[in-house]
Amino acid sequence: MMFRLRCVNTCLRRLLHGGTVNRDQVLEQLRVCSAEDQVFDVVGKNKAKLTAEHVSCAVGMLWQFQKERPELLRTVDLIRSHPQFLTLRVLAENKIAIMDDLMLVDMLYAFLRLNIEDNDSLVQQMVSEAWLRIDRLPMSSLSKFAICLNDQNLHHSPLMGHITSILDQRLSTIDDARILTTLMISVSSLVSPHLRDALISRAEKLLLTMNPLQYNTPRRMVQFLRNIKYVHRPLLEKCNKIFLLNIPRLDAENIGIILGLYQSLQFNNCDFKLAAKQKLTELIDSSTDPLSFSKLFIALAPIASQEIRERLENTALLLADEFSPRQALAIAEALEEVQSRNLSLVNKIASVIQKNLHVYKSVEVARITQALSLLQYHNPEFFTRLKNIMINFLQHSFYPYEVTMLIRVLSTLSSPRLDDSVVSKVDAVVAQCNLSELSTISFAVAKWIRNDPSYRHNTHSKYVRLLQTLSRCGHERLQTADRLDFVLEELKYISGEWFEEMLLEESMATLKRMVDQINWANAPDLAFFLTRANYLCPPLMDRIASVATEHIDKIHHSSTYATLLPFSVLNYDSVQADELFDACIKRFTPHIRSFDPHLLVLFAYSLAVADHFPEELIREIFSIDFLGKLDCQIETLPDTLNMRTRLRLMELNRAVCFECPEFQVPWFHERYCQQLQKKGNGSISPVQQQIHKMLGEVLGGINFVQAAVITPYFYTIDFECKLDKNLKPLPYSEPSTLQISDRGRVHWDSRSLENIRDELPPGAQRVAVDFLDSKSFCKNSHHMKGEVLLRKRHLEILGYRVVQIPHFEWNSMELSTHDSWKEYLRKKIIR
């Protein structure tokens, strides 16, 4: 009985609003209905008596019955095809003008949930009527109306702009977090920076007053941040605490949604990920149907152990034929994410996708192609079919993001030439593309150039013209830009040769032009871009240091890592930089234990590169509890980040042993380094082979020099030689523990991994000779990077005199002859 009352609660509220009313027999008949057929029966018997209230109540009950059922058991299609549903639609359309505001919006919402088409006259008239009343709608109805507009893809419509304006005006009156978050998501594509900050501030306040068990509300807050691509860590951390509290109540679908949102925002939280992993693992035995299992697989596979992952894949293989088209696509992408090599499962999922290829949209076809290609799925005929479908979609698309994605994925297929339809489509949308999209398209064109065998013999005008157009649009976009935050957003993920050659200098000129717009909020993003670009720009870095030092208390403690990174990596040493390091260390130290373990390791290593070793930070990282937590977290990280974190921990361990012996941190990476050496490819460049040969000539024989020498603590030196107290070369008593093949491959024997060193006579010295390629220097100068200096410091502690051979000196016109190279080496080593 309570369920039925809840279904018609809205109807009763309106009828009783004015006090006592006459008995309504039709409403009473609707009230006792427990299924759709009963509702339709009442409608059919009372067509002539039905009022707007009756129609509203009937439609609301039909949606409520569907809403209470699992998605697979819903019967929306049967409802829409029922004759009496048409009656309700006609009556509703005829009574729009006499509906009250709440009824109008509620009925529009219910009809859309029952899959009435957007272009249906009923929907269009209800939207038009609601627009006329929009300024007087209560916020609860306004939020529901905004959802309806989103359902119709009217995100950027003038009507949504009107709702955004109303939200801005009435924001302080909203006390319901659910209403607020629904509106936040609906208007996310239209919010200004000012409104964004106001919405976040209001959301943070309402989080403090809401029921912490209502996890959908904070989930929508995180979704809003994802939609606007804005990482606001204080709000994320508050939401994360609520998610952790609700882990026992979360199902696989909600956990997967939260993990996906975090991934999009690049927000890692070790505690949530570990708790999610445990909860998802507990759900394996109860997730036996295709719907629940597919959601479990998507959420758990990327963070599961190898054993659990294999178990999931085996179950997926058994259920594969029952997966829906969308479920099969999601499984394929999850398999690609974990780099699965289960060919039986990949083939089975691909077979399901092929059968349903006609139902996928353009972006989904691109995602399918990308996933199957990276999974090394072999079916040339199917890939040809995918290519033709994508080209057809491309010809009919005018959305820059969609065109860009289709072009990017098309370029990965084995197509020898650039299709003319691609050129014409780029010409049509290029003026609307942002910098990231321009870079992506140029990367695709570069692939076609490499794959086109005729390009080497004949410069194709279509390639040249297309690249020129992309470059021109990129320059124009930068030159006309006037907002630093927008430029940084577009530059956020750009990389590649085209950007570095065509737009990097222009980008830096634009950023320097906007130097006065650098503030505490965008300084970490700008610093991170400079690090990725490997570009030393003192004016920008001085401004970052000045602003961040002055406003360090406003910068979130986790953002101090990105802020300091370019000063460490690019080795920028100045008075302002020293002040910044001190300020950031003081800022993050009280929050050390709130950092994710892997991020704390990366942070500590970047500080070590800059010769900073905060004692509290070092002792925290090398504590038993921390290392245990790090081990648990590393298992949930993507492989690339996993390996990077392990490597940085080793390098930090080595740096602390070298430079802070007073901390008494033991060296515990011996076995790890031996494994790295054995896995390494051991190749050396032709330049290094040339230097090796010439060193033998300079020192008096090849037995006076050793190549690829492994030092204690596992640094690998390009070349080592020994000089006596008179600077005369000393021969090695044992031949080199490695051999260099004709192809430049290095082969170690077992002795090379045991740190064996000949004893030096009194007064003699070891000389380490390192060739420094372009990666050792900043992009725009000969300024040496921080890691190169860290290595030099450590080799000197080991007793080496370090000789560095920069690539720009060795490859200069001045050293263009055999004798000049030998003389250069002689002066460097025997000085």
Image: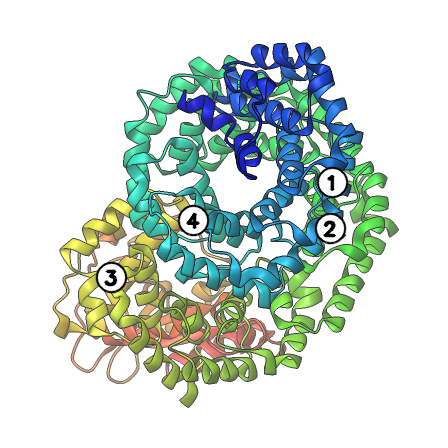
The amino acid pointed to by label 3 is Arg
In the rendering, at what x and y percent does residue 73 appear? 51, 16
Residue shown at 81% from the left, 57% from the top: 431
Horizontal relation, residue 360 to residue 393: left or right: left
Tag 1, which secondary structure? helix
Q: Is residue 424 above or below residue 491?
A: above
Give me the disc on residue 159. 2
Amino acid carrying mark 4 in the image: Pro
Q: Is residue 343 above or below residue 800?
A: above
Real-space CA distance between mark 3 and mark 4, rounded to the nearest whole angstrom: 24 Å
In the drawing, does residue 564 fall left or right of residue 522?
left
Which of the numbered marks, if any, corresponds to residue 593? Answer: 3
* Residue of label 4: 218
Instruction: From the viewer's perspective, tell me whether residue 660 is left or right of residue 330.
Output: left
Q: Nearer the viewer, mark 3 or mark 1?
A: 1
The image's mark for residue 127 is 1
Tag 1 or tag 3, which sits nearer the N-term?
1
Q: Earlier in the sequence, mark 1 or mark 4?
A: 1
Which numbered disc, 1 or 2, marks the residue that appears first in the sequence? 1
Q: CA distance from mark 3 to mark 1?
A: 51 Å
**First in sequence: mark 4 vs mark 2:** 2
Question: Callout 2, which amino acid?
Answer: Leu
* Residue found 40% across the figure and 24% down from its top: 2
In-front residue for pair 753/290:
290
Nearer the observer: mark 3 or 4; the answer is 4
Q: Where is residue 197? Give x, y as percent.
A: 53, 65
